């Protein structure tokens, strides 16, 4: 299943992970960027891919579509896993949304599922919306 493959992928590729890598946690001073407010939890998944997926979410939430697209162009060889992880971020934040934000979140979730399904091999089951 997709979750088992993510689990295996993440456990085999542990790396440094900020944990809350979003637009709001990057400060710029004199053309130097600083990452602030990291979340470190021992023995939790640690992967730069989680950071990239959360950053992708924050770009979308801040309507920075051009930067969002550039991010995926840059990490082209990891697009499938990043999109799947981004999907989990959208699902995670949905419960905190008001009704209007839930509509947008649901649209983004549906789009990501469609994009993920387009690239999945025929032998893998498609993701479904309930």
Image (cartoon, helix red, strand yellow):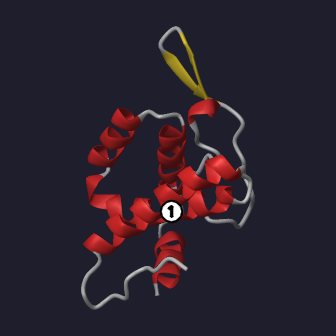
Q: Nearer the viewer, residue 116 or 54?
A: 116
Q: Is residue 130 left or right of residue 94?
A: left
Residue 17: horizontal and vertical position, in percent?
Answer: 58, 51
| Residue 114 visible here | yes
| For residue 122, above or below residue 65 | below
Residue under the image location 48 percent in, 42 percent down: 60
Residue 40: horizontal and vertical position, in percent?
Answer: 72, 51
Task: For mark 1, give the secondary structure.
Answer: helix
Q: Is residue 103 left or right of residue 74?
A: right
Give the residue at mark 1: 87
Q: Quadrant of the C terminus?
A: bottom right
Residue 116 position by quadrant:
bottom left
Residue under the image location 59 percent in, 42 percent down: 21
| Residue 19 visible here | no
Count the marks: how many? 1
Q: Nearer the viewer, residue 50 or 83?
A: 83
| For residue 95, above or below residue 28 | below
Residue under the image location 49 percent in, 62 percent down: 109
Crowd band around label 1 with a 10 angstrom C-alpha radius: few (<14), some (14–19), many (20+): many
| For residue 82, above or below residue 18 | below
Residue 20: horizontal and vertical position, in percent?
Answer: 64, 45
């Amino acid at each position: 299943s997709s979750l088992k493959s993510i689990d295996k992928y993440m456990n085999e590729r542990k790396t440094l992970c900020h944990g809350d890598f979003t637009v709001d946690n990057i400060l710029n001073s004199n053309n130097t960027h600083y990452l602030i407010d990291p979340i470190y939890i021992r023995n939790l998944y640690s992967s730069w891919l989680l950071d990239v997926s959360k950053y992708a979410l924050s770009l979308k939430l801040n309507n920075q579509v051009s930067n969002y697209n550039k991010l995926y162009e840059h990490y082209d060889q990891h697009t499938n896993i990043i999109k799947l992880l981004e999907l989990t971020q959208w699902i995670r934040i949905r419960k905190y949304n008001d009704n209007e934000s839930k509509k947008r979140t649901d649209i983004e979730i549906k789009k990501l599922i469609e994009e993920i399904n387009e690239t999945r091999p025929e032998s893998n089951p498609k993701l479904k919306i309930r």
